Amino acid sequence: MPDDSRERERSAEADRAEAAAAARLAPSSEFLARLAKVRIDLVARVLGAAKARSSPLVRALVAGSAARGTFLSDRLDVDLFLLFPPDLPRERLREEGLALGRAVLEEPETRYAEHPYLRGRFAGFRVDAVPGFAISDPAHPLSPVDRTPFHQHYLADRETPEVVVQVRLAKAFLRSLGVYGSEARTEGVSGYLVELLVLRFGGLRGLLRAAQSWRLPVRLEEPAKEPPRLPADVALILADPVDPHRNVASALSRRNLALFVLAAGEYLARPDPSWFEPRPPRSLSRSTALERVHERGSHVTVVVLPRPELVDDTLFPQVRKAERAIADEVARSDFRVLGSASSVGEHRVFVVLEVAHARRPVVRSQDGPPAGLDRVGHFLEKWTAHDAPVLQGPYVREDGSLGVDARRPDREIESVLRAALPRLSLGKDLAVSAPAPGTVHTLSEADESPALAEALTALLDRRLPWRADPGA
């Protein structure tokens, strides 16, 4: 049958595309051997350093994709976990973890998540040395990394060489969409979640076949098990096999899951090696953005806020909250919001909004109370005063309530936003106050910067990642 013939042809095309990608993604045997030696040497070096300083270290291990071979070579970090007794005070945990990291890593640099960790180099590899607690029950962690040894054991027991190949393919596929990574900046799919999904569906192709018909929100349950107590208002729910009350996919946004669902069907219909290749980031210059705004007959305004000194996982949720608050205020102020986006630069945070018109009407309809209520007198007194900004009224509406057409003092969106910005709830660390207040500009007034280009791209160059250009 023609349909069967076409299906076989697509399957063969997918086989070729995935075989080519798998060969490209596979690290050499020499590289894997060097990595295995580094893992052994790194743990031995840490244990030696712990003994030398009589550290209360319980266990050191390399876990994650570097331990299981499921990494993408250009995103390889060796994750070294330093596990201490559960009753060790957190201050001592930080002190010992950083000290041991500095003892074994070259060029150590302190990074911050829930607590500090070190990033440095060891034998040519980039290494993150992360302190945590050596717990016995993964359902009761004391820090976010405490489940890691249990994750390592669970996956290492189940991942065959064939599964490892499929995991790499799945990670490359997600990366091509821009949705690989669970950090707050990305809101995508974590490496651990990728591996669980590949195991669950038997490989990349099985995952894509299942995902192409998902309807959000998606809840994946193990057969014959009670559903875990997890919130229902998320994109994807998959219980952590080592802690069934934890949703492994809690960081994944609905937008990114929907993009993956759409991409799954597109790939299965038109397999191609390009689905496994990194896509270069797009960047829209201010001049190009101005041309697009002119074509669209719209207006873009730019809000610039000082960047607070926060780690990304704390900063980005606040930036998205600020974007929503600003867009909501603009909509309440009678501007038609066509879209909004935000980005984070080295020193500044940008929120950009596209509205249908830069100026709102002079007239504003002011609601009044129904006739017969005590408040009517106050309303009439206010709106019949000699200095009241009235264009028409007061009058009685068809429903029996009073109304008046008032004159607006501010009509331009930038003026309205400048007045509103100090009172908006933008996130506790993004509050607009002296000595570093936020500023509002038209797009033509805004200074060029990579962060502004990123925000403008998200606002004015929205398209499916696998489409080569807006007209493709």
Image: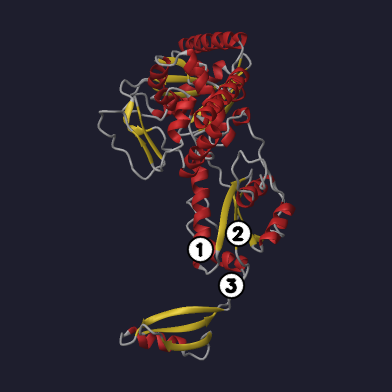
Amino acid type indicated by mark 1: Glu
Which tag, 2 or 3, sits closer to the chain's start? Answer: 2
Left or right, residue 296 beside residue 224: right
Report the quarter where the C terminus lies.
top right
Q: Which mark is residue 142?
A: none
- Asked which secondary structure carries label 1, the reply is helix
The residue tagged 3 is 360
What residue sits 31% from the left and 20% below the top?
136
The answer to the question of whether label 2 and label 3 lie on touching residues, with beta carbons closer than 8 A, is no
Q: Which mark is residue 354?
A: 2
Would residue 263 be seen by someone viewing this image from the given angle?
Answer: yes
What residue sits 49% from the left and 45% below the top?
317
Q: Marks 1 and 2, Cα distance to the nearest angstrom?
A: 13 Å
Total marks shown come to 3
Please state the horizontal and vertical placement of residue 88, each as a whole percent of the image: 36, 24
Judge whether 120 appears above or below 439 on screen.
Answer: above
The answer to the question of whether label 1 and label 3 lie on touching residues, with beta carbons closer than 8 A, is no
Judge whether 342 appears above or below 63 on screen.
Answer: below
Please state the horizontal and vertical placement of residue 92, each as a whole percent of the image: 42, 25
Please state the horizontal and vertical placement of residue 364, each as a whole percent of the image: 52, 78
Q: Which mark is residue 329?
A: 1
- Asked which secondary structure carries label 3, the reply is loop
What residue sits 63% from the left and 67% below the top?
358
Using the image as rendered, state which of residue 427 and residue 27 is in the foreground: 27
Would residue 311 be seen by someone viewing this image from the given angle?
Answer: no
Q: Marks 2 and 3, Cα distance to the nearest angstrom?
A: 14 Å
Residue that extends furthest to the right in the rendered view of this protein? 287
Judge whether 283 appears above or below 176 on screen.
Answer: below
- Asked which secondary structure carries label 2, the reply is strand
Amino acid type indicated by mark 2: Glu
